[in-house]
């Protein structure tokens, strides 16, 4: 029942992820999709799709960028390509791409993913009426809001159970602009450069920041880890779990996926107890990059605390 | 020879209060946007009750202007109840359109308040024509473009859709794609998409990496003045006053001014300048010239440096607030004209800020009327000579050499 969706950083890793228990691989190229561990060209992408299908597993391709006029023109052709290689689903965050699916009569299911913007059941059901197969729930929706929401949604929602949470996307090159102003020039501002910012008076904080062709992206202080509350998600039948390895080591990410797959399998056998859950969470922590923290994000926040 | 006229786009001004609504319209705005008690992003702006909306709409319609209500939050589960009733009341108050970004609220407005026109808020970050087509298909009358869209992109969008296009031309900017920023949620537990934005982008941050030894390594640099410069994401404000022809020719239907939280002084000044410039251009495009006085006027109410945002390319470091700030002209709003006597040349003014004999003050009114006057005498409401008018709302009169009109405003340069 529960579906594990994981990002992919390479064809090799795709193989390992499928063996580790991933049900659906999530990948794409930077020109059309946002914040991906690797930008897959078409030949590589096709290989991953074939591999996943050989294993009886599915592939979702990221088409969730905010498109300007130059790029929206190229979306229809890309969608037709994805249809031709039998991609199972795409993600969309710009309604213009949904409009194109209909206009061009392209037969591809889509999951609506607008990072922080999907926050209510009514909105999820709105996208359902527009043929969405699923929607990505904003990370700013606490558990207490998930409870009433889960009862009335008409399509599955995807919940981030592990990984980095984007909290800002700018169309400006924010690091480059800063770097151009100061005398000490930074030669790199991409994800591999590993830059962080910390909030005033909170030197212990570390928000990841990087630039790519989609602008500047900033991430939450800690990565999300919902291992300890998976039974609560399951109770609400929120059974599409996303693991995002954007900032994870390729090999360690596979270990993290294994831990979540194990939790899923034990839960299916009704054999998951607190002790096992704690052990599996330990695996997640052991494989987490040392400079990055883990927490449950907005999960435990009282909705009334948010102003 | 008759000048060739072009289609006159709407100048859309912010109105935080019923008073500002009337002033914006008096000062030339073709439309204003306001907030209701719920569903708006400016929870701290003076918001309108339904009765105030009705009065505002009546005033606007008498003056051939329109009123829109911004209801552009991104709703969570607990915000959904009552939305339909809210939109019905807005519609029944005679409001011309609601500005919405959350698809669930758009659907609610359309299905539960039939007849109410809906505009897509800039918070939805619409950046291409297929997105505009999507929303037109849903029944929307207008789309407010993302602030990231350039002039050439607008021209292209215009060719591929006939939904109305609204674009920001003046005021403060988000540094990120509007709606795609939850810095405030994560850093201040205040929801940026529900009116709580704490403007965390304008904070000063540390910038660093963590090399293999696990220790933080500072990467902050020094500005041209040699001082340590902290990392920031603070955008300068926008002003497109020097590019009105480009906006009109690109096919923008509504030129939007930011600032529902701003003062009467700001609203009257900015509405006055843009309506004057747009009218001048549309009446005679061939002979149009930018009046430097319009630019000067906007600087009098500027809070930050001004830029053209994304209209002519991706903003570089000069479009962000780094280093030493430019010195802003400081003007105080000192009063409102209540009456003028042509025979005695006495103007009666209701005071809003301290002024007095010896000060040079500036009268301004609708249609860009201006008069600079040195105050040589001053009398209170009992005709007693006084030196200063120190009390708020105090009624005074003094000699003014040129005729001014009731409703004109008075400002003074505080640096003199």
Image (cartoon, coloured by chain):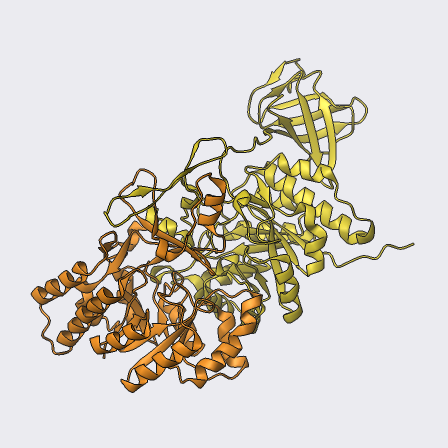
Chain colours: A orange, B yellow
* Residue reaching furthest to the right: B1
Number of on-image labels: 0
Residue A68 percent coordinates (x, y) = 54, 64
Residue sitting at 64 percent across and 48 percent down?
A: B240
Quarter of the rendering containing residue B161? bottom right
Q: Nearer the viewer, residue A177 or B39?
A: A177
Q: Is residue A244 visible?
A: yes
A165 lies above or below B399? below
Q: Is residue A14 left or right of residue B5?
A: left
Residue A238 spot, x, y in % from top left: 26, 71
Q: Position of residue B58 (x, y in %)?
A: 63, 53
Q: Is residue B189 visible?
A: no
Q: Nearer the viewer, residue A108 or B171?
A: A108
Who is closer to the viewer here, B342 or B189?
B189
The quarter of the picture where the N terminus of chain A appears is: bottom left
Q: Name the residue located 58 percent from the left edge and 22 percent from the top edge.
A: B354
Above/below status of B183 relative to B378: below
| Residue A186 in the image, given as x and y percentages of width and height | 42, 46
Q: Which image quarter: residue A84? A: bottom left
């Amino acid at each position: 029942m529960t579906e594990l969706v994981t990002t992919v950083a390479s064809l090799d890793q795709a193989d390992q992820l499928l063996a580790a228990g991933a049900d659906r691989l999530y990948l794409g190229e930077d020109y059309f999709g946002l914040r991906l561990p690797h930008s897959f060209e078409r030949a590589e992408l096709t290989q991953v799709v074939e591999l996943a299908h050989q294993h009886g597993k599915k592939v979702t391709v990221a088409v969730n960028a905010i498109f300007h006029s130059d790029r929206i023109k190229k979306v229809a052709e890309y969608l037709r390509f994805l249809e031709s290689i039998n991609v199972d689903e795409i993600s969309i965050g710009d309604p213009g791409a949904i409009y194109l699916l209909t206009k061009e009569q392209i037969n591809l299911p889509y999951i609506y993913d607008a990072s922080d913007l999907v926050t209510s059941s009514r909105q999820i059901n709105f996208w359902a009426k527009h043929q969405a197969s699923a929607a990505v729930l904003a990370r700013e929706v606490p558990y207490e809001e998930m409870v009433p929401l889960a009862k009335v949604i008409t399509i599955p929602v995807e919940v981030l159970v592990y990984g980095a949470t984007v909290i800002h996307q700018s169309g400006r090159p924010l690091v480059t602009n800063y770097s151009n102003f100061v005398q000490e020039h930074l030669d790199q501002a991409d994800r591999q450069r590993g830059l962080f910012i910390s909030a005033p008076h909170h030197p212990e904080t570390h928000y990841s920041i990087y630039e790519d062709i989609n602008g500047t992206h900033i991430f939450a202080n800690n990565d999300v880890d919902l291992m300890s509350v998976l039974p609560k998600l399951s109770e609400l039948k929120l059974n599409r779990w996303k693991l995002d390895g954007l900032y994870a080591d390729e090999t360690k990410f596979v270990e993290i996926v294994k831990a979540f797959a194990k939790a899923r399998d034990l839960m299916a056998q009704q054999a998951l107890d607190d002790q096992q859950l704690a052990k599996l969470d330990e695996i997640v922590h052991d494989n987490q990059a040392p400079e990055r923290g883990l927490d449950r994000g907005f999960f435990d926040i009282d909705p009334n605390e948010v102003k | 020879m008759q000048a060739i006229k072009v289609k006159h786009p709407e100048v859309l001004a912010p109105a935080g209060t019923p008073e500002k609504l009337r002033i914006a319209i008096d000062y030339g705005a073709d439309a204003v946007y306001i907030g209701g008690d719920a569903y708006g992003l400016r929870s701290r702006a003076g918001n309108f009750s339904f009765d105030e909306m009705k009065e505002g709409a009546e005033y606007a319609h008498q003056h051939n202007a329109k009123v829109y209500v911004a209801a552009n939050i991104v709703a969570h589960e607990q915000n959904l109840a009552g939305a339909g009733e809210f939109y019905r009341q807005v519609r029944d108050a005679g409001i011309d359109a609601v500005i919405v970004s959350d698809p669930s609220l758009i659907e609610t407005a359309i299905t539960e308040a039939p007849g109410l026109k809906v505009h897509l808020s800039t918070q939805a970050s619409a950046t291409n024509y297929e997105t505009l087509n999507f929303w037109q298909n849903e029944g929307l009358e207008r789309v407010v473009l993302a602030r990231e869209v350039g002039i050439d992109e607008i021209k292209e969008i215009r060719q591929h859709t006939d939904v109305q296009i609204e674009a920001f031309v003046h005021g403060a900017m988000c540094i990120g794609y509007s709606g795609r920023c939850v810095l405030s949620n994560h850093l201040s537990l205040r929801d940026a998409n529900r009116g709580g934005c704490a403007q965390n982008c304008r904070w000063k941050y540390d910038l660093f990496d963590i090399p293999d030894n696990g220790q933080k390594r500072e990467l902050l640099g020094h500005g041209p003045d040699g001082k340590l410069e902290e990392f920031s994401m603070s955008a300068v404000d926008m002003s497109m006053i020097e590019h009105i022809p480009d906006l009109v020719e690109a096919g923008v239907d509504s030129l939007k001014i930011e600032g529902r939280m701003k003062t009467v002084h700001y609203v009257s000044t900015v509405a006055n300048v843009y309506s004057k410039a747009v009218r001048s251009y549309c009446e005679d495009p061939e002979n149009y010239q930018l009046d430097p006085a319009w630019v000067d006027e906007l600087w009098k109410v500027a809070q930050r440096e001004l830029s053209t945002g994304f209209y002519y390319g991706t903003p570089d470091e000069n479009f962000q607030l780094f280093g030493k700030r430019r010195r802003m002209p400081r003007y105080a709003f000192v009063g409102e004209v209540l009456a003028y006597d042509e025979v005695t040349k006495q103007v009666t003014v209701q005071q809003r800020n301290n002024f007095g004999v010896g000060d040079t003050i500036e009268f301004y009114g609708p249609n860009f009327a201006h008069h600079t006057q040195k105050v040589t005498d001053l009398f209170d409401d009992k005709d007693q000579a006084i030196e200063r008018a120190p009390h708020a709302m105090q009624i005074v009169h003094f000699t003014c050499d040129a005729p001014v009109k009731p409703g004109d405003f008075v400002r003074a340069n505080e640096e003199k």
